[in-house]
Image (cartoon, grey):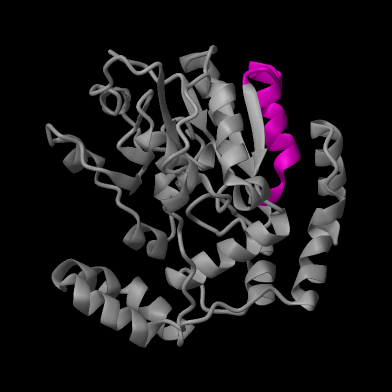
Amino acid sequence: MSKANFFLVGAAKSGTTSVYDFLNRHSEVFMSPIKEPNFFSTDIRIDKFSEVYRKTTFLDTDKYFSNSNLEPLQLTFVRDRKHYDRLFEKATNEPLIGECSTSYLYSENAAQNIFNYNPAAKIVIVLRNPIQRAYSHYLMALKYGFIDTDFLTAIEQDQAKDDKGWGSSELFIDLGLYTAQIKRYFDLFGEKQVNVMFMEDLQFNPKAFYYSLCEFLKIDKQDYFYKDLKSNSALVPKHPTLNKFLVKFGLKKFVKQISPLILIKFLKVLVFNSEVPKLTIIEKKFILKYYEKEIENLALLLNRDLKHWLL
């Protein structure tokens, strides 16, 4: 039975879908058919998930693994080791076998659990300016109907929650507190087995980014297909409260299941705005107060100049 020896652990909303897609096409790599199985985030409690998160997340893992051929799936929460092992059963002679669960960076248990599973595993972390990451996260939450408020209100409401957690709150700020999260991996795997990369490098020089990734993973620099990689596009609903209502009662999911693709595209035009609003100066200053010290600490940990994140 093949075993994973590579983990792309986050951060959420930092380009991991594009990186996963790149690796999934690479001839020397086998990636899990479930992009984010979240198996090692054992501190994530499925029973604590909010109603709206449950309605938008595939959780019937027994049904999924009842099939002999595992179809591609974006995200679920695998909790059975036999199920997890099946994710890699079709791997043949690929030197790199891996998966990409963005909860692993945030989870306090995942690093140790991965180390117990395979202490020789390679870890890749892709970071994004935490202010931009939080705003992108907000747009995603708005799109999927998790929230229906403006950005600053959404941040304040999420920060005020007593029982924050993955699937039960948004963690807009928490997911950008990288320093302690990365240190867990450095302490266990050592800095030679952990490669910290940056989404800004992926955006401005994708060829160099992927060459660097291939060098770290010791695979061929196959760069001919990186230009048309997937990404999770932002869409802002015209009526956020109505959008949230439709998600809460499962109507959007129902329509998606029964409607042809052309109708779904038409409905998107009706429901969502064509342009995504930009982060304002006021919003940026408000969020910066949560991250000033964090960015300084991260720069010290990584020995990298991150002053431009503060501008």
Residue plotted at (67% across, 50% down): 200
The answer to whether residue 148 is above or below residue 294 is below
* Snapshot quadrant of residue 185: top right
Q: Is residue 109 visible?
A: no
In the displayed structure image, the side of residue 93 where residue 97 appears, left or right: right
Residue plotted at (15% across, 34% down): 69
* Snapshot quadrant of residue 35: top left
* Snapshot quadrant of residue 173: bottom right
Give 143 or 235, whichever is nearer the viewer: 235
Residue 299 magenta-drawn? no
Residue 306 x %, y %: 83, 47
Q: Over which residues does the magenta segment extend?
A: 176-193
The answer to whether residue 83 is above or below residue 134 is above
Residue 180 magenta-drawn? yes
Quadrant of image for the C terminus:
bottom right
Give 217 or 16, whichever is nearer the viewer: 217
Q: Is residue 95 visible?
A: yes
In the displayed structure image, the side of residue 171 where residue 271 appears, left or right: left
Residue plotted at (21% across, 42% down): 71
Residue 242 x %, y %: 40, 85
Residue 34 x %, y %: 33, 39
The answer to whether residue 107 is above or below residue 229 is above
In the displayed structure image, the side of residue 289 where residue 30 appears, left or right: left
The answer to whether residue 184 is above or below residue 128 is above
